[in-house]
Amino acid sequence: MPTPARTSLEAIIRAARGVLEAEGLDGLTMQRVADAVGVRGPSLYKRVRDRTDLIRLSVDDAARELTVALDDAADADDPRVNLRALADTLRRFAHAYPTSFGLLFAPTRGDVRLGPDTLAASSRAVLETAGALAGSARALEAARTVVAWAYGFISMELAGAFQLGGDVDVAYSYGVDRITEAIALRD
Amino acid sequence: MPTPARTSLEAIIRAARGVLEAEGLDGLTMQRVADAVGVRGPSLYKRVRDRTDLIRLSVDDAARELTVALDDAADADDPRVNLRALADTLRRFAHAYPTSFGLLFAPTRGDVRLGPDTLAASSRAVLETAGALAGSARALEAARTVVAWAYGFISMELAGAFQLGGDVDVAYSYGVDRITEAIALRD
DNA sequence: ACCTGAACACCGTTCAAGT
DNA sequence: ACCTGAACACCGTTCAAGT
């Protein structure tokens, strides 16, 4: 006799993302997530292969949320305005979900890797805006330059590497301008 | 009656770094490190507070090695040449010790954080070269821009985010040039 | 068809007992 | 003074038994 489902993959991912940001990666235990969705630990394995899979699903879910935010952000005509909006959106995302952000490109964790489709979707808005600034032939490398800088800057910020002083908001804003001009230089 | 020491903190850190790069962060178990230095697990706690402490010590050790390499790299008169040498040195370090590199600024792991002195020492060469390019008043933000870009680029490279094709070496080299010109622009 | 308790392997850590 | 085996708590994971 079938038992009605007492939870769902969506609920599990939502709970896992909450735990991930509240307690960090080490705090994400199967027990903790099971408690949060009102089920026993072993039941999670009905919907999720293992803990690594759950982490990947959570980061993937966060990446999709980021993609939506980025797509919404770049709605102006001026590509410089759009690039700033994209950079600000990425930084807001990172502050809201630092652990997920850190795992997005974490070189340390080969096991938690996003699918190419998720990556491509989240790159779309940046690629388009970068292309408008640098020329479509240079779109890819321009986009990489912007994302690399922004990811690096925000990672260092979150890691507390900017202890030498100075206003981090100002530094970020200034950096966006510099990078924008750097990729807008035609040759 | 005193027992002669059968290992040392240095040997433990060396072994831990080896395991860290060979097996990744999850592979760094106390048991594994103990085996590598020829001692039982509990003995490690005579020299190390806990596993987190051992990770931090390992990353700190890697950071010191990086500092030496950076100091040696920037020996030319032309700051552009030096900046390229510094960028190449950082990238070589990252490829040699990807896990340590990832932990250097990992936003995800607040527990494994380098001391300000270690950070300051490793920044010195970059700060000096950046200052020579951007002017000493702009040295700090110029250095941050370079390091943020390089860290982000290499992280994405190691994370496999550059699957869209193109020669990564060329992209890195090109990026160094762009960033160099961006921070060399006086205003 | 999903959920559960019991069980297992593994790991970090402590500690009393050895030398 | 350092090392060890035993022990404990905790966690991921499996599985037979329940409904």
Image (tube, coloured by chain):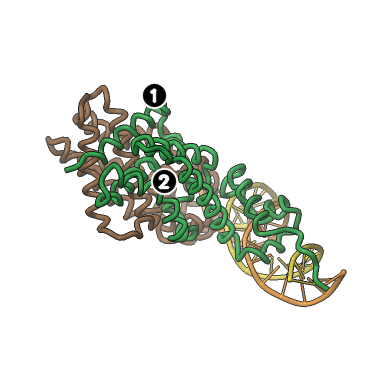
Chain colours: A brown, B green, C orange, D yellow
B5 left or right of C12 in image:
right
Check disc 1 and report the residue beneath it: B166
B94 left or right of D6 in image:
left
Check disc 2 and report the residue beneath it: A59
Q: Residue at 71%, 59% (x, y): give it.
A: B41
* Whole-percent x, y for residue A49 in the image: 54, 44
Viewer can see residue A187: yes
Residue lying farthest to the top in this orientation: A137
Q: Quadrant of the C terminus of chain B?
A: top left
Q: Are marks 2 and 1 in contact (CB under 8 Å)?
A: no
Out of B174 and A51, give the one closest to the viewer.
B174
Quadrant of the rendered structure where residue B160 is?
top left
Q: Residue at 62%, 63% (x, y): give it.
A: B48
Out of A2 and B52, give the one closest to the viewer.
B52
Subunit under mark 1: B
B54 left or right of A61 in image:
right
Q: Amino acid at mark 2?
A: Val
Where disc 2 sits, the SS reads helix
Out of A47 and B132, give the one closest to the viewer.
B132
Q: Answer above or below: position of B1 versus C10.
A: below
B80 left or right of B40 in image:
left
Between circles 2 and 1, the one closer to the viewer is 1
* Whole-percent x, y for residue B159 in the image: 45, 38
- In the picture, the disc for residue B65 is none
* Whole-percent x, y for residue B115 in the image: 46, 61
Q: Answer above or below: position of B36 versus B166.
A: below
Give the crowd class for mark 1: few <14, some 14-19, many >=20 residues within 10 Å. Answer: few
Q: Residue at 16%, 35% (x, y): give it.
A: A79
Q: Amino acid at mark 1?
A: Gly
* Whole-percent x, y for residue B119 in the image: 43, 55
Give the crowd class for mark 2: few <14, some 14-19, many >=20 residues within 10 Å. Answer: many
